[in-house]
Amino acid sequence: MSLLTKEQYEKIASSVKFSTKALINGKLVDSISRKTYITANPATGQNITKIAACDVNDVNIAVEAARKSFEDGRWSKMAPSKRKEILLNFAEIIRKNHDELAVLEVLDSGRPIADIATMDVEETAASIAWHAEAADKLEDSITSTGPDNLSLVVREPVGVVGAILPWNFPLLMAAWKLGPILASGNSTIVKPAKLTSLTMLKLAELSLEAGIPEGVLNVVTGSGAIIGEAIGMHQDIDVLTFTGSTEVGRKLLEYSGQSNLKRVLMELGGKNPCVVMPDVADMDYAAEQVVAAVFWNMGENCTSNSRLIIHKDIKDKFLAKVIEKSKEWNVGNPLDPQFKLGSMIEKSHMETVLGYIKKGEAEGAKLVYGGHQTLTETGGYYIEPTIFDDVTPDMVIAREEIFGPVLAVLTCEDEADAISMANDTVYGLHASIFSDNTNQVYRLSRGIRAGTVSVNCFSEGDITTPFGGFKQSGFFSRDKSLWANRQYTELKTIWMAIR
Ligand code: NAP
Ligand code: MG
């Protein structure tokens, strides 16, 4: 997808229509209370528009609509090939609205257009399409029992799925959930993050155009403490799927225990290591990847490789290259395709990240690059890419997820030390390894406890690969791949006597 110019994106931004209503039972509606909340553009600090502020009453109606649509089979019992067709149509409609969706996402989140217009919107459509394609290809099984029985093991949609989404990749996280939820025949109620609801609301409108039957996809907007909790505690939601912080994840498990023991699937935080060993052949390329691994999306990324563990023999030389490559990560107006980095999501989050930078300095780490708020004249919330050297494993900046553009550099003695440092965390979402010694790469890949290990690159894999976390980075969940389809189904055994 080729990029437009800043002027062209600004023109789209000046005329774009905002979708601000919830989608309940096939209708775009205000909240019952008529209350609204304001969503703002973090790149300018300006308000954008007002969005329906739903509460527990709206959630109850949406769940009722979802349940009715599930029980009467308008989607759950539709031939999988027909569901596939409708979802492929949905994906095409998303593609047709590419530029508008991209601009809406930039305005609401401060994320750079250069990423969203080349990756996120297309990957959103592709994720819906990939799972749709699987709908009529996955097969059930007949087990090898004796001649007096026929045993069928079949997958059935689970029912009503509640999906609670984060603000950092609003479109893509929605698609990672919606693709497999809908392709598997479930009905759903989605709650986007309050900070970034605009693209999910646009997707809701487009789903009507695509022909997804009413009641199957519902979208409620509002605060997590109110409607997130209402979804979590609801007695008639069968599965709760979540991407967000480990802290909120803990609450969701409690809600499940206090209500109907709904299945809880969670993708949570990370403090991901990137290990660089001495026999890496192309240090310039490795440094380029290392910098992307930490700063991409302003570090507001659960897989951000925010701990760089370098072998002592190459430490100084490699770090110098990392600092050099960091200079390419320019920060500016996210509607301007020349910038790799936009603004942080909101003022309070920017302040939290700046607080971590202060903490790093106070704990004795050495600030070697960046470290400040920037572009204050814009009214937005921008932070320079920041690098700390001489970080030790006990420091707060080596232990806590910062969710900002802050790299902590640690030094390891050998391979065993690298593995032990990499695993010295409560998280286990992602890791990267740079080495051209195949045996060493294999040992490191198996030794580091993380859901995805990328070797000689920074990557989360593609739509064919499962994505999820070990340890406190997740809970029984994998997004993407056929594993994602399976987790939104129930297994049923049908055991027949043959007489
Ligand atoms: P968050 O604060 O946990 O919020 C996530 C969602 O949960 C939002 O929709 C939020 O609502 C809602 N929520 C808040 N309190 C709730 C409650 N008491 N009950 C139910 N729902 C509640 O996370 P975030 O700040 O948006 O996202 C950043 C975090 O997500 C980071 O920790 C990051 O690592 C993680 N993340 C993980 C992955 C992954 O795949 N592993 C991917 C992306 C992000 P409101 O905010 O609208 O009030
Ligand atoms: Mg916003």
Image (tube, grey):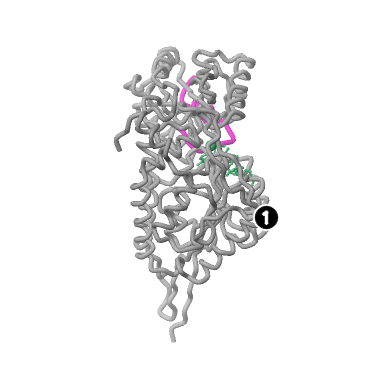
Q: Is residue 99 toward the left or the right of residue 399 in the image? A: left
Where is the C terminus found, in terms of image quarters? Answer: bottom left
Indicate the position of residue 78 as horizontal and vertical percent values: 41, 68
Q: Do we see residue 399 in this rendering?
A: yes
Which residue is outermost to the right?
Answer: 258
How many badges with numbers are in the image? 1
Q: Is residue 484 above or below residue 292?
A: below
Residue 437: quadrant of the picture: top left
Residue 440 appears in which quarter of the rendering?
A: top left
**Residue 85 vs residue 241: left or right?**
left
Question: Residue 296, percent across and down?
Answer: 44, 29
- Is 420 within the magenta? yes
Residue 33 lies left or right of residue 22; in this view the side is: right
Of the pair 117 and 164, the residue shown nearer to us: 117
Which residue has dot 1 on it? 257
Where 58 sits versus 368, above or below? Answer: below
